[in-house]
Structures are given as C-alpha cells and as structure tokens.
Image: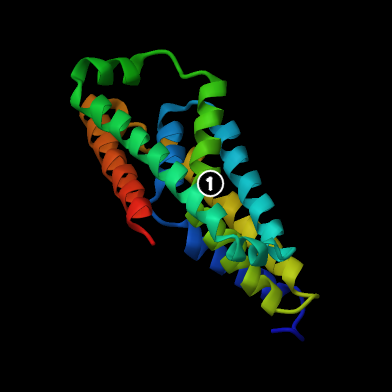
Amino acid sequence: MTGAGPLLPALSGLGTGLSLIVAIGAQNAHVLRQGLRHEHVGQVVAICALSDLVLIVAGVLGIGVVMDRAGWLVTATRFVGALFLLAYGLVAGRRALRADRLAAEVGGRPASLRRVALTTAALTWLNPHVYLDTVVLLGSIANSVGPQGRWAFAAGAGLGSSGWFGALGYGARLLSGVFARARAWQVLDLIIAVVMVTLGTRLIMDR
C-alpha cells in the first residue's frame, strides 16, 4: 500500500473508520436522540465530527504511542467516563419509566445549546475507547501505509466519520413519524439506558 497513490489509502481509511464508528454506542445513541428531537443537530454533528478529526490527526502524528505508554491516563479516563455513562444511563432509564417526564421530554422545550454541547463533548472525550480506537488503532494503521499515504488514510477516516454522524443526525428525521408516539420514545430511552449502563459497567470491569 506504500507505493500506491492516495486513493487506495483514502479508501482504506474510509472503510476502517466506518468499521470502528458504525456501532451502537454512547455517542451514536446521543446523536440519534438529538436528531429525532430536531435539537441542535448541526452543532452535535459538528462536535462529533471535529472531535474525531482532531483525534485522527493526533493518532497520525504519533500521539497514540505516548498514550499507549501512559497507562495511568487511560485508566483515569476510563473511570471518569464510566461514572458519566452510568449517570447518563440512569437518567435515561428514569425518563423512560416516568410517563409524565416522558411527555414533557417529547413535547417540551428544547434543551439549551450549552447543555447539549457539553453532553456531546463529554460522551466523546470521556470515552477511553475513542482514544484506543481512533488515536492508537487508526494512528497505527495510518502510519503503516507510509509517509505519503498516511494523510490520505486520515482524510478517508475523517470523511467516513463526518458522513456517518451527518447521516445519523439528519437521517433520524426519516423516523420522526414513528417517534411521534410517546411509547416509541420510551423504548428508545430504555435502549439508551441499557447501552449506557452496559458500557459504563464494562469500563469499570476492564483491567
């Protein structure tokens, strides 16, 4: 792959990036929920996409090697992220089980941009798997294609990330008919609660 033009590394980066990001997780669940509520979707997508781009560039620059050796930093991030995910999951579960709260969530006023932005940033930057997958893994693969191809690989991965978040956030509008019913929101919040609590528990149990 080293001697190939930029197209092949870019396509490789696109495929690798999508394979890592297209999965049910805390960040994707949050983007989906904001898309369904039509709340600050552009800002949420931008925060996720730009954050991924920064992390991909950091990995290409070799910061993943430093992080891989700083075990204490990964451990600290893991426990802080776990506590945040558990709290987020408990809030989602409580919201799903309370019919009056659920009705207020479906038809009430949108959350503030500041609150949504902070939640989005926390779900992105407090997740240690983001660093392991994006910085360490993607960075290692990018640097393995050679100095000429690594930035094409990074561009492909960044394009995949941006495209996915945009499709998830804005594509959620296609499901707005289904989520016009409070019961659908209840099911979604229960799924989000299970995902968040499971991820948080796994982070605490990881060694």
Relative to 155, say whether 140 is above or below: below
Instruction: Please state the horizontal and vertical placement of residue 172, each as a whole percent of the image.
Output: 42, 39
Q: How many marks?
A: 1
Name the residue rendered at 59%, 33% in the picture.
42
Name the residue rendered at 70%, 79% in the picture.
145
Instruction: Please state the horizontal and vertical placement of residue 25, each as a whole percent of the image.
Output: 40, 50
Give the camera-side residue of 150 and 176. 150
Q: Farthest front residue?
A: 72
Position of the C terminus by quadrant: bottom left
- Evaluate whether residue 14 shows in this view: no
The amino acid on which the numbered mark 1 sits, given as a three-letter code, is Phe
- Evaluate whether residue 16 shows in this view: yes
Under tag 1, what secondary structure?
Answer: helix
Instruction: Please state the horizontal and vertical placement of residue 132, each as a whole percent of the image.
Output: 53, 61
Q: Which residue is mark 1?
A: 165
Give the camera-side residue of 19 and 65. 65
- In the image, taking residue 171 as reference, residue 137 lies left or right, namely right
- For label 1, the crowd category at 10 Å Cα-Cα, with few meaning under 14, some 14 to 19 and many 20 or more, is many
Relative to 117, say whether 15 is above or below: below
Position of the N terminus by quadrant: bottom right
Residue 71 is drawn in which quadrant?
A: bottom right
- In the image, taking residue 196 as reference, residue 140 lies left or right, namely right
Relative to 128, say whether 183 is above or below: above
Name the residue rendered at 40%, 44% in the picture.
82
Name the residue rendered at 52%, 37% in the picture.
122
- In the image, taking residue 178 as reference, residue 174 lies left or right, namely right
